[in-house]
Amino acid sequence: MTGFSKAEAKEKGYLVTVEIKSLNGRFLEINSKLHRNIAHKEFEIRDIIKKTISRGNINVNVTIEFDDTIQPFEIDLDSAKQYYNSLLKLKNKLKMKGDITIENVLHFSNGFIVKSKTEDAELEWKIVKIALNNALNSLDNMRKNEGQQIIKDISARMKKVANVLEKVDALGLDKIPQERERLRLKVAQLFESDEIDEHRLQMELVLLADKLDFSEECVRMRSHIKFFNEALKDKAGDSIGKKINFLLQEMNREVNTIGSKCSDAEIAQHVVYMKEELERIREQIQNIE
């Protein structure tokens, strides 16, 4: 299913932006473009995505920016104490007057101010996960809305198929007696000057008429349509697309059998229409998880 989402997360000077694009696909394919600081987290990012998405071509882009003006830092207190003690010894040795102030110690700050933006990997990863999950939630909502629209379209098309099936079934029941009589007259003409075993002829006509009867296919078709509609409503089920692909295959088989049995032009047109609608439904199903 198609979709796009973008999410940002900001904390302590870090700004993480995650963009996710989703395209239709039968299987799950994930392509990622990650900031170098989290390149080693690719497999963990894939696992997070798999918990939300099961099908489609997914493109993930993660960028990380840092505001140097609010760079977090920590003071190495042990180093600061050593600098203070060294200054105190120097003062006593030189017999200098006055107190040693914080300003004196800060002259050596480059020696004991630690922790740069590249060292806080845990904080970076934490913010990335927040942005990634927000982007996935947004994408999932978009895909759900699209899925509902697709299901409405599929349901409407399947309703049309069911209505046409009823017409085909009714036409088939009307055509059987007509076809039986047509065949009887045709056979009688072929053997007009010969003796015909009327009993045997009737038996053959009955057998042939049974072959032309597709009422059983119509019954099975109704059953498949019923299970199909139930599968569309099964929100708690596993992959809907995979589940109802099998039902579509069975429906296509029944429609093809009806088409091979009928010799009526009107029924043939209805069969063609049902096959076209089932094919459109099959294409739409490929987009549903």
Image (cartoon, grey):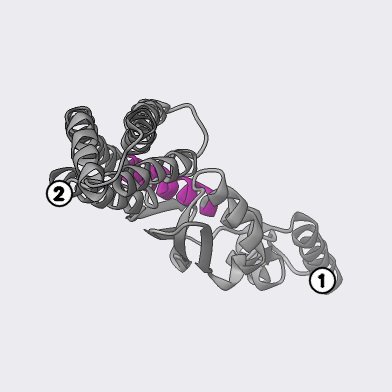
Instruction: From this view, report whether residue 239 is shown above or below residue 17.
Output: above
In-image side of 104 versus 82 (left or right): left
Label whose residue precedes the other's in the sequence (2 or 1): 1
Residue 84 visible in the snapshot: yes
In this view of the protein, which residue sits in the foreground, 264 or 1?
264
Amino acid residing under circle 2? Ala
Quadrant position of residue 83: bottom right
Magenta part of the chain: 128-144
**What is the distance, in whole Å, between disc 2 and disc 1 at their CAs?**
111 Å
Q: Which SS does the magenta portion mostly show?
A: helix
Query: Which residue bears the numbered disc 1?
Result: 90
What is the total number of numbered labels drawn onto the structure image?
2
Query: Quadrant of the image for the C terminus?
Result: top left
* Residue 109 numbered mark, or none: none
Residue 228 visible in the snapshot: no
Q: Which circle, 2 or 1, is nearer the viewer? A: 2
In-image side of 173 versus 118 (left or right): left
The residue drawn where x is 81% and y is 69% is 95
In the rendered image, residue 142 lying in the magenta stretch gets the answer: yes
Query: Which residue bears the numbered disc 2?
Result: 265
Which residue occupies the extreme left position in the image?
266
Quadrant position of residue 205: top left
In this view of the protein, which residue sits in the foreground, 1 or 47?
1
The local crowd at label 2, few if under 14, some if 14 to 19, many if 20 or more residues have their Cα within 10 Å, is: few
The local crowd at label 1, few if under 14, some if 14 to 19, many if 20 or more residues have their Cα within 10 Å, is: few
Amino acid residing under circle 1? Leu
